[in-house]
Image (cartoon, rainbow, N blue to C red):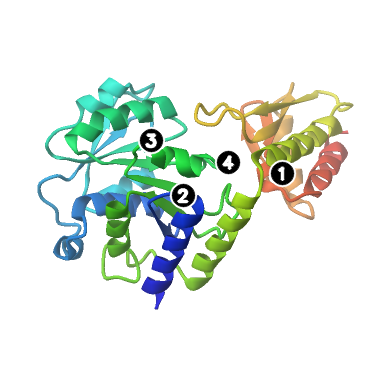
Amino acid sequence: DLNRLNESAGEYLARRIGVEAAFISCGAASGVQLSAAACLTGTDRDRVAGLPETDGKNEFVISSVDRHTYIHQGIELCGGTLVRAGTDDGVTTEDLLGAVTERTAAVVHFLGKQTREQLEEVIVGCDPLGVPVIVDAAAQLPPRSNLIEIVGLGASLVNFSGGKGIGGPQSSGLVLGKKAFVDAVGLNASPNSGIGRGMKVGKEEILGLVTAVDRFLKGSDSDDRTSWERQASLVVQSVKDCDGVSGEVLREGQPAAPDFAPRAYLTFTGPDRIPTTLKSLKKGDPSIVVRRSGDQIIVDPMTMRPGEEEIVAERLKDILT
């Protein structure tokens, strides 16, 4: 009985994390889509069965700086209509709240491009209007405190990836929030006959994510950060004698989490060397894939197991010497 298994898992995770309710989705993107469906239907089974046909409140306010088109498509597939606020360069709280009307089903906040401070302001503005707030926080773990604090701000539904910071199954996600909304998410999701029927979460993903959350909560942000700093520093050290390359450890400039995920940034004086370096890393054994940004290669220790930084460092040294 998959329904009962997911219900039991959600009840356990809600208690374990310390929130009102939890649901396991097949990923953060599907969680946002199911969250949108929940705001359109509530727990009305006729409305669940009727999606994507909607009437009344079916508009979702979303910032123009959020360029995750798959999120936009998911909301529209549910029957929602997007109302974009702000410009490509930025969005203010006034822009978002000014786009709210009597037809607004929810405001969608992308935590990362949009700040926690703005999220608080949006929640304060939406609460007296009875407008739900959906948060896409897929990559906002760690810090572990985000599991409780974002919901604690008053967000209706908060979506995390199960396969990123938590380290669980790649095809899993975690929806946390107010019980009435989380219940509505479940009604729209597999194995029920609803808009999310195709977003199946198997027993392996359910039990895998429960195990991963337990392990994640037993861990320490400071221990993670120390480990990542060490790994990133080793990678930087490996290129110190390589001509035309300099390295430093920096933290991702996301306003929502400035103190986490230190990364090794390798800057090349001749950007023409970057494509050949990337190709050599990828074609080697084992294959190593890293990010490029302009004249830099970025090595993210969050994606490495302990000891793998030594493999990456040695390969970079061989290629660049």
Residue 51: horizontal and vertical position, in percent? Answer: 19, 59
Q: Earlier in the sequence, mark 2 or mark 1?
A: 2
Residue 173: horizontal and vertical position, in percent? Answer: 47, 55
Residue type at tag 4: Pro
Q: Secondary structure at mark 4?
A: loop
Dot 1 crowding, Cα within 10 Å, few <14, some 14–19, many 20+: few
Residue 314 placement: quadrant: top right
Q: Secondary structure at mark 2?
A: loop
Pointer 3 residue:
153
Q: Earlier in the sequence, mark 4 or mark 3?
A: 4
Q: Earlier in the sequence, mark 3 or mark 1?
A: 3
Label 4–label 3 contact, CB within 8 A:
no
**What whole-number distance in Å separates the C-alpha atoms at marks 3 and 1?**
45 Å
Residue 91 lies left or right of residue 306; in this view the side is left
**What whole-number distance in Å separates the C-alpha atoms at marks 4 and 1?**
31 Å
Instruction: Give the label on residue 142, or none.
Output: 4
**What whole-number distance in Å separates the C-alpha atoms at marks 4 and 3?**
17 Å
Task: Tell me the residue at 40%/39% (across/down).
Answer: 152
Q: Earlier in the sequence, mark 4 or mark 1?
A: 4
Please say if 127 is above or below 212: above
Residue type at tag 1: Lys
Dot 4 crowding, Cα within 10 Å, few <14, some 14–19, many 20+: many
Pointer 2 residue:
18
**What whole-number distance in Å separates the C-alpha atoms at marks 2 and 1?**
46 Å
Label 4–label 2 contact, CB within 8 A:
no
Task: Tell me the residue at 65%/40% (across/down).
Answer: 221
Q: Quadrant of the C terminus?
A: top right
Pointer 1 residue:
279
